[in-house]
């Protein structure tokens, strides 16, 4: 893991955008996607106010943005008062860790998302923009791009994909039962920016990847694994698509990614390394052993899912959202690797570079 007529309020028509003077609530506003989406909305003259919801209110305060503490988990405070009078709710909150405890991530990612959707409906919010993911897609091709009608059943063994797919199924029913609400599902590839480096290192790599090692020339080889082809997008470019989804009278799913497709050769070029073919089974066995020892935070099941993700066609987002990434996938990755070397972050709880050991909420 984001897209109003001045008079569009809680009773706005199903096809309406939110337009000039709109009020937007961003749930999960302090992580990688959330900070970029908040900034993009705050800088939009058509947006009158942005309310950022997060478990811990940050010191970071863009102009035109208010903050409130909120927890989406079941049993948390009522979300309806935060949503009442809003023209759009953007739901980004997601928890990757503790990956060894899938019941905890299910409570936040599935049950918490349902709480957000139901509260938005109860508050009469006319537009809901939800951060789905390429991870919701069923395994797909690496030699061609799929459109938004590719099946979204995920990779059942991986909690992240299973949860994203379940929320997609729940939204199918929600949209049927709430035709008055405009529901948008954003399905981005992997989102990177400099400020997300410390958080993403904690979530996916842990202490086995010191940032200083990602300097060109220090990593001698990049493994060329079967299926190692994936799509990347700078988080700020994704945020502009979310802003457009708030403003424009669109519905449904949108794939988001920048070119070129990332493979071992591109990674090797960034790291000044050699490409070496490696069997997938050997890498998976090593990752599984490290996972059992709790030496890495990302599970081997997520590794399996990653190598099976389809490549996405983004033409619908280009047509209907005006989606045109300003940075290539190579530029986004280069910025992120620089952030890893510098232990970069932001003054929010999820992105703070010194936040090791705390639970990982993202968005």
Image (tube, rainbow, N blue to C red):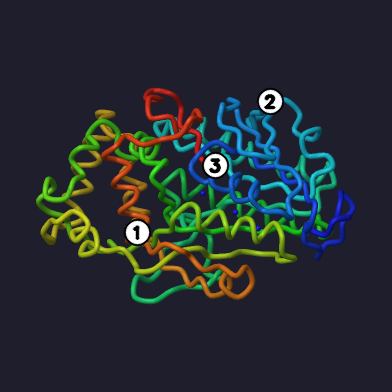
Q: Residue 7 appears at what percent x and percent y?
A: 89, 55
Q: CA distance from mark 2 to mark 1?
A: 40 Å
Is residue 295 positioned above or below 178 on the image? above
The residue that mark 3 highlights is: 35
* Identity of the residue drawn at 30% across and 53% down: 334
Q: Is residue 28 left or right of residue 330?
A: right
Mark 3 and mark 2 lie on one chain; the one further toward the N terminus is 3
Mark 1 burial class by Cα count in 10 Å: few <14, some 14-19, many 20+? some
Tell me which numbered mark, 3 or 1, is placed earlier along the sequence.
Answer: 3
**Residue displayed at 34% across by 75% down:** 143
Which one is nearer the viewer's eye here, 168 or 228? 228
* Residue 52 falls left or right of residue 144: right
The percent position of residue 51, horizontal first and vertical second, equals 70, 38
- Image coords of residue 293 (percent x, y): 24, 28
**What residue lies at 80% left-to-right and 45% top-to-bottom?**
86
Mark 2 — residue? 76
Viewer-proximal residue, 114 or 233?
233
Mark 3 crowdedness (10 Å alpha carbons): few <14, some 14-19, many ≥20 = many
Kind of element beneath mark 2: loop
- Disc 1 element: helix
Q: CA distance from mark 3 to mark 1?
A: 19 Å
Task: Determine which residue is flagged by label 1.
Answer: 331
- Decide if residue 274 is on the left or right side of residue 337: left
> Residues at badges 3 and 1 in contact (C-beta under 8 Å)?
no
Q: State whether residue 145 is above or below residue 63.
A: below
């Amino acid at each position: 893991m984001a897209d109003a007529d001045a008079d569009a309020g809680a009773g706005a028509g199903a096809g309406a955008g939110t337009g000039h003077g709109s009020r937007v609530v961003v749930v999960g506003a302090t992580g990688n996607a959330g900070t970029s989406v908040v900034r993009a909305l705050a800088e939009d003259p058509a947006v009158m106010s942005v309310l950022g919801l997060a478990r811990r209110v940050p010191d970071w305060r863009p102009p035109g943005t208010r903050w409130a503490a909120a927890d989406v988990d079941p049993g948390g405070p009522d979300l309806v008062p935060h949503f009442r009078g809003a023209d759009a709710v953007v739901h980004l909150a997601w928890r990757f860790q503790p990956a060894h405890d899938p019941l905890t991530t299910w409570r936040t990612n599935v049950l918490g998302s349902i709480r957000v959707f139901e509260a938005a409906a109860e508050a009469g919010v006319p537009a809901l923009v939800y951060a789905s993911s390429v991870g919701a897609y069923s395994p797909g091709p690496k030699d061609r791009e799929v459109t938004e009608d590719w099946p979204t059943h995920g990779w059942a063994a991986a909690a992240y994909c299973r949860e994203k797919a379940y929320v997609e199924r729940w939204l199918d029913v929600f949209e049927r039962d709430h035709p008055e609400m405009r529901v948008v599902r954003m399905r981005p590839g992997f989102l990177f920016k400099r400020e997300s480096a410390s958080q993403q290192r904690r979530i996916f790599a842990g202490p086995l990847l010191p940032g200083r090692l990602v300097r060109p020339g220090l990593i001698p080889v990049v493994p060329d694994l079967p299926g190692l082809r994936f799509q990347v997008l700078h988080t700020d470019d994704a945020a502009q698509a979310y802003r457009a989804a708030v403003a424009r009278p669109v519905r449904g799913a949108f794939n988001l990614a920048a070119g070129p497709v990332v493979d071992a050769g591109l990674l090797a070029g960034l790291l000044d390394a050699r490409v070496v073919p490696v069997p997938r089974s050997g890498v998976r066995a090593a990752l599984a052993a490290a996972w059992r020892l709790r030496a890495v935070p990302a599970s081997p099941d997520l590794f399996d899912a990653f190598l099976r993700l389809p490549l996405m066609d983004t033409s619908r987002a280009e047509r209907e959202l005006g989606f045109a990434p300003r940075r290539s996938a190579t530029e986004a990755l280069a910025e992120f690797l620089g952030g890893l070397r510098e232990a970069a972050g932001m003054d929010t709880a999820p992105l703070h570079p010194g936040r090791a050991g705390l639970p990982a909420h993202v968005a």
